[in-house]
Image (cartoon, rainbow, N blue to C red):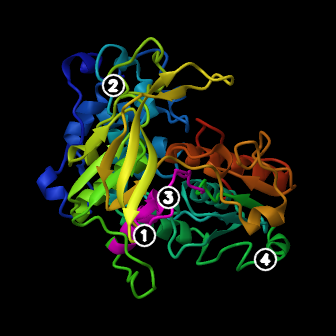
Amino acid sequence: MGSLRGFIEIPRENPEKRPVEERVRDFREVYRLLPDERVQQQAARCMDCGIPFCHSGCPLGNVIPEFNDLVYRNRWRDAYERLRATNNFPEFTGRVCPAPCESACVLGLIEPPVTIEQIEWAIIERAFREGWVKPEPPARRTGKKVAVIGSGPAGLACADQLNRAGHWVTVFERDDRIGGLLRYGVPDFKMEKWVIDRRVAILEAEGITFRTGVHVGRDYPVDQLRRDFDAIVLCTGATQPRDVKVPGRELAGIHFAWEYLWQATKRVARDDLEAAGIPIIDAAGKDVIVIGGGDTASDCIGVANRQGARSITNFHIWPAPPKERTPEMPWPFHPHLLQVTTSHEEGCERVWSVQTIAFEGRNGHVERVITVDVEPGPPGPDGRRMRREVPGSRREWPADLVLIAIGYEGPERSPLLEALGVELDERGRVKADEHFQTNVPGVFVAGDAHRGASLVVWAISEGREAARGVDQYLMDYTTLPTKGEGDLPLLR
C-alpha cells in the first residue's frame, strides 16, 4: 500500500449530504460525491493489513485493497479496470449497497472503516466522465440463445456475463421499463433512474435485447419460450409481500410498500397514473404509519416526507438494536446495529417493540391502528425468537395511510413457475443445485427468486454465478469468472 500511515493520520470522511430542508422538496439523490482529491485521501486509509477480510465481506469478492491503492496513486483507469473485473455495475452498488465489506474492514477494529462504497462510486463515475465505459460487444457469437426473465440486478448481471461469452441474450421484463426492484423499489432520492438507463444503453449496444411489457407465462407461452431459447434464467425476484393479517386489513388506505414505492417512481417519471385508471396513493397532509424496520420501510418514510405527510410513525416489532457491536456480533461479520438513514433524519417517530393487532376505520377507510407493546420471550421449539404481549399496553394511533413493509415471502406464484414445473423449497424459493440449475434441465435461477429478498450486491453475484452455470450447460465448459476472479477477454 502506498500510504503506510494513512489510516492513522486521515479521519473517515463520508459523502456529503444535501441539507434536509433542500432535499425533501425534490427526489434528487441525497448524497454528493466528494471531489476526487478527497476520495484519494480516503483510499489512503486502506491498511496493509495482510489478510483483507473485506474480500470475504463482499459477496462479489471485489479486490478492494487493489483498487483503493490505485485510486490513492491517481491511477483511476487501472482502478476502474480492477473494479469492473468483479462487479458489473459499480454505479448501482456504490449508491445502494449497505457495504458489508466495510463491516469486515480490518481498520474497523480500531477506527471507522475505509469508505469502500464511496470509493467504488467515485471510480465508476470517473470512468463514465472519462469515456472509459463504452460498449464492447463480443467479436464472435456462439449461436446459442438465452432468455433471462426479469431485469433487476440479477437479470442484468446474468445477461451481461452471458453476452460477454458470446451468447444471444434476450431479457424479458413485465413492467414498462428495465430495472425491476432496482427501478421501482428504490426511490429516486437513493438512485436516480438515469443511472439505470445509462447502463442499459450500453448493454443494448453490446447486443443484448430487452423486451418490456411482456409477462412471460401469460403474454408469452412457456412452450414457445422453450422452443425459442436454448436456456432460461429465472431472475423474477421475491416480490410476494408479507402481510399483516389482523382485523380491519380490508380497509382502504392500507397498502403494501411495493405499491407505494412503484407509484412514487412512476410519478417522478411523470407517468399519468390517473389516466391509466390507477388510484393515487399520496401521503400529502396525512398521518402515515409505516410498519416494518428495514430499508423498504425507510424508503417509504423518505417518500412520505417528500409528499408532505402531516406525521410519520414507524413501527418496529423488535427492540432497538445496539449502536455498537456486542459479543454476539463479532467482527468481521455484518452486525445488526441501529441504523439512522437519511429518511429517518428527515423526520419520523420510531416506535420500538410494538405489534399491530387491528386496523379500525369509518366508511370503509382506515382511521386508526391498534397496537400492543411486546417483549422478547423464550426461544420457540425451532430456536427462533418469540415475543409476548406486555399486559395493559394497548394503544391507538391516528392513521390516514398505512404502509406495510415487513418483507417478502419469495417469488410470486405465477403461471411461469407452474408451467416450467420448477421445484420450490419450504420458504417458497426456487430450488437449484450448485450451478444454479433447477430441477428442470436448461432452466436456471438467480437472485431473490433463489436466495430470498436480499441485497443488490448479492443479486449481482448470483447473476454472475448463474451465468457460469448456463455457459457450462450450453458449451460443456466455461471461461466466465467466478467470485473474486477477473474477467478474461472472451470471444473478442
Reading the image, the residue beneath label 4 is: 221
Reading the image, the residue beneath label 2 is: 113
Placement of 382 over or under 67, stated as above or below:
above
| Distance in Å between CA atoms under marks 2 and 1 | 51 Å
Front of the two marks 1 and 3: 1
Front of the two marks 3 and 4: 3
| Distance in Å between CA atoms under marks 2 and 4 | 50 Å
Q: Secondary structure at mark 1?
A: loop
Residue 364 is marked as 1
Crowding at mark 1 (Cα within 10 Å: few <14, some 14-19, many 20+): few
Q: Amino acid at mark 3?
A: Arg
Q: Amino acid at mark 4?
A: Pro
Depth order, front residue of 299/479: 299
Q: Residue at x 21, y 33 (%)?
A: 13
Q: Secondary structure at mark 3?
A: loop
Percent position of residue 352, x then y: 35, 34
Q: Earlier in the sequence, mark 3 or mark 4?
A: 4
Crowding at mark 2 (Cα within 10 Å: few <14, some 14-19, many 20+): many
Reading the image, the residue beneath label 3 is: 249
Percent position of residue 107, x then y: 35, 18
| Highlighted magenta segment, given as a residue range | 240-267
